[in-house]
Structures are given as C-alpha cells and as structure tokens.
Amino acid sequence: MVGRELLALLERRRFPVAQLQPFSSGRSLQNVRFRGRTLQAPAIDAKLLSCCQLVFMVSSEEVARRFGPKLAAGGVWVIDDSSEFRLDPKVPLVIPEVNSSALNFHQRLIAGPNCTMTGIAVAGWPLHKAATVREVRLATYQAVSGAGRDALTEFFDQSRANAARQTLAPDGRAPIWPCPARRALPQPIAGNVFPQVGSFDPQGHCGEETKVARELRKVWSAAHLRVSVTAVRVPVVRGHSLAAWLRFSRPFAPQRARRLLRHAPGLKLMTANYPTPLAMAGLAPVFTGRLRPGIDARELCLWVVSDNLLKGAALNSVQIAEHILRKGWLKRP
Amino acid sequence: MVGRELLALLERRRFPVAQLQPFSSGRSLQNVRFRGRTLQAPAIDAKLLSCCQLVFMVSSEEVARRFGPKLAAGGVWVIDDSSEFRLDPKVPLVIPEVNSSALNFHQRLIAGPNCTMTGIAVAGWPLHKAATVREVRLATYQAVSGAGRDALTEFFDQSRANAARQTLAPDGRAPIWPCPARRALPQPIAGNVFPQVGSFDPQGHCGEETKVARELRKVWSAAHLRVSVTAVRVPVVRGHSLAAWLRFSRPFAPQRARRLLRHAPGLKLMTANYPTPLAMAGLAPVFTGRLRPGIDARELCLWVVSDNLLKGAALNSVQIAEHILRKGWLKRP
C-alpha cells in the first residue's frame, strides 16, 4: 500500500530520480508504474541494492533488519518505514516538521514513524514547544489501509456481502448484521469498529498503543511525557483520525493554541469546520480541528486527521529524502 | 428506531400489557406490529393518552414538553426518552442498575438517559462507588441508528453508492472515494467518521458532549465530576462504543477493578476478548473489556459497548417500567 504511494509521490513531487529499481519483498512479485512505464519488481537483491544512492524500505521488520544496517554502513541512504529501528537510540526517528535536526550526514539509516503518531506529533508540536505537554491521551480511529492490502481487500469483500442487508428490517427496526468470516484482521471491520491494532502485552496494551507512546517521546525528545492510547480500527479506507487530550504544565488558552497552530508547518488548522478522513484522503497535510478546552484550563482537546499512507508513511519518507537532498548530502544524479 | 425496539421488548419480556395504543408523533403515520397484530398508530391524542396507566415517550423534546408534565400530573406514569426533562431537578433521570432509588411514587414523570452515557454510567458505577471517579474522558464511536431512521437510510444509500468503488485503484493504490451528498447527517458517513453529534456551543463542544457530561453527573449524583467528551459518529448500524479514561481519587489496581465488574448488574466484563458493536448488536447488557492501566496508577482505561437502541434507550425504559411494576406502583391490568 505504502510503496505505490511512494512511487506516485516521487513522480508528482519531481524527485530527481535517475533510475528507479523497485523490489518485491512480499510473497508475490509485483509490477509497478513509474513515469508512465511499467517496471518489474524482482525479489530483493543485496548486490543491486548496494549500488543505489537512496533506498526506501517499505517492508517488514525482518527485511529492514536484514538489509538496512549493511546498506547504510556501505554509504547508502536508507529510509525505513518499518518499526524495526525506530526506537534504536543510534537511528534518527524523523518527522521533518518536528525534528529534522535529528538527521545527520554520518547516520544514513533513518526511521520513519508509526502512521498513527505522526498526526499528533505534528499537530501537538507547536503547543508542546510553547507550554510543555505533560500528558497525552489518544483514542484512534484507524483506517483499514494501515493494516495492508489483504485487510483492505477483506474490508471490501465484507462490504459487498452487506449490500443486501443495507435496509431496515421488515418490522422497521435497525437490522442486526451477522458477523462475517475474517482472515487478515482480528475482527470483522465492515459495519464495525474494534479496539485492537497489533497484539496484546501482559498489561493489556496492544502493540500500536505502545509504539505510539514510545515514538512520540522520541520524536518530541520528551522522555518524561506520559502517553495513554486506545487504538481502534474503523471502516475507513484511508486516513487515521485521533481524538486527543493534551495536558500542559500550565493553563493554555484555546485562542493562543489556535494562533500557534495557524501557521505551523505541515499542518492545516480548521476552525469553521473540522477534518474527516473521507474528505482529507489523498491530501498531504495533517489536519486539525475542534480545538477546545479539555477537562480544565491546563488541558486542550484536538481532533486530528491525516492520510495514513501519505504523511503517516510515504510522504514523510519522501520529505526526509528531500531534506537530505537540500542539505547536499545526496549527490544529484 | 427506538419505538419499534420498545414494542419488541415489551413482547419478548412479557410485560403485562392489557391494551397497547401506539401513536405516531412524526411527520407520517406509522403502522406497528405487536403480538402478531398490525396496529395503526394515529396522531397523538391527549384525551386517549390520559386514559393510559403508563406512557412511553420516544419522540422529540417538543412532544415531551407538550404532553409529559400534564399526563404525569393526571396520575399517568410517563417514561420519556427525549432530553427534555433529563436535567430537570424535579425529574428522576434513571438507569435502574445505578440509581433506581431515584424513582418514587409521587414523581410520575421519569427521564431515560442519553444513549451514549448509559454505557459508561453502568460500567463505571461499581468503580465509582469503590474509589470515587474524579475525571472521565471519553471518545465515542456512535452508531448511525442513534441519529434516527433518516440517517440510517442515508448510510445505506451511501454504502450502496460505494459498491462499485470497493476495489483497489488501477495502479494498486488504496482508492480515494468521493464525498457523497448528505441530508440527514452533517457529513458523509459511509467510509468515514466525523466528530460531531449535535450542534456546537461557543466553547466548541457539541450537544452530545455536554449532555453526556451533565447526565453522568446527575445519574451518579457526582456534582463535582469532571467530564470531557469527544463524540464521533462511525459507520456502524447499532451499538455505541466508548474509549474511556477514568481517573480516581486514589490508585486503583486493574485486578481489583475486574473483580468489582465481574458481578456488576447489567454488565458483562470480557477479559479473554473484547466487545465490538457488530457482535453485541441486539444484546441487552453493557459490555466492557480492555480494562488496563491509564496514564498512571490512579487511572484506568476501559472499552465499553452497548446497543444504543436497547440499553441506551428502549430497554432502559422497559426496565424502569418493570421496576415500577415490581414496586406495586402500577396496577396490573
């Protein structure tokens, strides 16, 4: 899912690619389109990879582990979208709007963040700089595409099966739909929501919840930040939404927060209306709205939406590459 | 939506109805089924209403205002599901599992609660009694049926229009769906989520968020409880879900909370798995799961699911009526 977005972005943003070599890391070999041509994507080849100047890895942790460090040691810039290296203290975890300063010429293995934390990392950063966020509580509304192609296909299959049920019951009641079979996702997703993204740890947190907390602390350089997340999958194709509570070290007026967010990089603050994942799908910025007081004057509530395949993944990687390019660290072909 | 559930429940629970007189308060006259017969539901008639022993009002605030107080003054028991009287200090706002003691023989106008707060009111009550909840933060995942029949029909229409789009784009990317027209709901709902239930106040809270906060304080008799809600509509037919953070006056171990919730009335605690609205649609209890630590030892996170048309509305009203009946306050026919 992310790989194809990446190719579309490299093309659309005129990234100076002299030669593109796609690889298929999954079970089946894929063809991809780039600049009007169809390219075959063979299985990964370490030799070919080592000849590249820049490698985008949009694959599994296992593939990242196997190829990433070696390539970077050989002088190749590697931007990895898996979670393998994100918490490695030697590897910069970068959202350019927040911490591009973490990039450096000698550390060529770079991690892109989890797609769910990207939205709050971008939207909350100007507020954190102004008044130090102490606590973050997040309830997520995560799109199915974040779980990959098989999950999305499963969502579509289940939706088609519901077509005949999209009507009131004969007695006028709201219908009760059966639970369909599932393979890729842990629960049915069409006409449903479920609070599980990843597997559970002994405390009862799921993988995504822990990732968001740890990665947000790293990207904000906020070791003492307290984060609590409930990660929920919703029947949306593209776009992760977040209901966020940010608790500050001191009172923070919504009006002041709006002023700070109005011109924040990579962010679009909506005040007359609010963002939704359907309307913002395919758009680059992080969107936020419904900025209002939380439980008291030290707390603000925000609603945040971003396209999980773009700013949450492919776009962030391309922005990192553009940053490296602007620094002159990547020889133009 | 709620009226038809109510009739089905009166029948299924063998409520001792001698004669049922349905009325249509909406724009069009409806027929309803009860005990195998089709009954015509004429426009509301104050005279006929005043001859009833018990009136369930599942209509607008306007209808409740116009008929409720007069009927109750005339000795008729009135159980109103609108929000008209919920915050009236003279009117009991009742969830039987929590505050049936608020019912009394001389106050015959009774309010049922908002369907969104019912879940957390039931699931949080045993914990509140044990350790005093100070703060409640809720992100909601609210079913379309909660917005009424027109909204549900709109959801079905939009879903049908998406049928041809339930496939990957030709280049293998996740599709970007167009935003369809809408009438009943403030945003498209198929393939979308949106953070608006009701209209906005000057502070930026929407109607549902304020209702949940005020009603929870009243039902729990907790005037100082601090509540912050983000209310979100999701493409689900039946069943409101909640991601909840409960903050206590002192540390509260999840294990102790589980013990308290295991035998709580009207509640089903899930530990091996968690509830989802699709699987719990049509079921009576409030379901909770994913009970785990929140941001520190004084906080617990919960996931709560209940059928908004049942425990959130019709079932709660019938349970109130059953309570009145058990008390001997309603003469058996």
Image (cartoon, coloured by chain):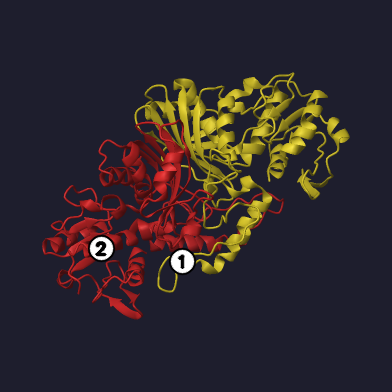
Chain colours: A yellow, B red
B159 vs A18: above or below: below
Q: State the residue in front, A255 or B291.
A: B291
Residue A81 numbered mark, or none: none
Asked if badges 2 and 1 are on one and the same chain, I answer no
Q: What residue type is disc 1 on?
A: Pro
B48 vs A73: above or below: below
Question: Residue at image x 39%, y 51%?
Answer: B263
Residue A192 visible from this viewpoint? yes
Dot 1 surroundings within 10 Å: few (below 14), some, or many (20 or more)? Answer: some
The quarter in which the C terminus of chain A is drawn is top right
Q: Which residue is mark 2?
A: B321
B109 vs A270: above or below: below
Dot 2 surroundings within 10 Å: few (below 14), some, or many (20 or more)? Answer: many
Question: Residue at image x 54%, y 53%?
Answer: B191
Chain under callout 2: B
Q: Along the horizontal axis of the image, is B78 left or right of B144?
A: left
Which of the two discs, 2 and 1, sits closer to the camera?
2
Q: State the residue in front, B119 or B86.
A: B119
Residue A58 visible from this viewpoint? no
Q: Which residue is mark 1?
A: A175
B228 vs B162: above or below: above
Question: How far apart are the alpha carbons under marks 2 and 1?
Answer: 25 Å
Kindly indicate the quadrant of the structure image that contains residue B9. Answer: bottom left
**Furthest-left residue in this view:** B74
Q: Along the horizontal axis of the image, is A162 left or right of B151?
A: right
Q: What residue type is disc 2 on?
A: Ala
Kindly indicate the quadrant of the structure image that contains residue A254. Answer: top left
Number of labels in the image equals 2
